[in-house]
Image (cartoon, rainbow, N blue to C red):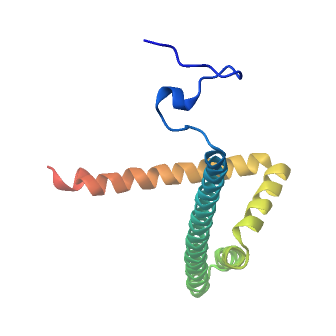
Amino acid sequence: MTMPDVPTGGAPRDADFGTEPTATLEDARGTGGTRTQLRQVKDQVVDQTKSSLRQARDRAASSLTESRFQAADQVGGMATAFRRTSEHLRQEDQGRAADFAESLAEQVERASSYLRDRDFGAIRQDVEGLARRQPALVLGVGFAIGLLGARFFKSSERHATGGYDDGA
């Protein structure tokens, strides 16, 4: 085996190996083109990801808004029930209890209007402000909601699995 001639630059010539040139000026420009293409592909992927996230956020916001309106309607239904109770208590000559039920109906109606009129950002800010002013109240309400939620899930689990209604 003979060694190829090494030109004065120190590197063997391509012709000495019997192959075509491996790197030309056009290939170097092509690498820049490849980088440009990669950058464009990356930008497209980023844009598509942002678009997908924006769509998901919009769908979630729409769903939350719908849920907020449903909750407001349910709370409004509770206000109506308290008002009916108040009327019934008045017919039974129980004025104090009727006044209490009417007052409760007004409070619940205000809560329903609040849910209907405020967006989630404003509600979150209001809850944060309340938590700063009355942390014990917020913890107590959170605890009560947790207990009610646990009770709800526990009772729905029994009915879903057949629980106590099937057996003995």
Picture coordinates of residue 139 (x, y %)?
Answer: 70, 46
Task: Residue at 55% x, 31% y: name it.
Answer: 14
Q: Is residue 42 above or below residue 79?
A: above
Outermost residue toward the top in this view: 1
Camera-nearest residue between 166 and 13: 13
Picture coordinates of residue 114 (x, y %)?
Answer: 72, 75
Q: How many badges with numbers are in the image?
A: 0
Camera-nearest residue between 29 and 85: 29
Outermost residue toward the left in this view: 168
Task: Residue at 58% x, 83% y: name it.
Answer: 80
- Name which quarter of the figure residue 109 lies in: bottom right
In the image: residue 95, left or right of residue 70: right
Picture coordinates of residue 137 (x, y %)?
Answer: 74, 51
Picture coordinates of residue 123 (x, y %)?
Answer: 74, 65
Position of the N terminus, as image quadrant, is top left
Task: Residue at 65% x, 74% y: name it.
Answer: 97
Q: Is residue 96 above or below residue 38?
A: below
Camera-nearest residue between 20 and 115: 20
Task: Residue at 25% x, 51% y: name it.
Answer: 163
In the image: residue 133, left or right of residue 23: right
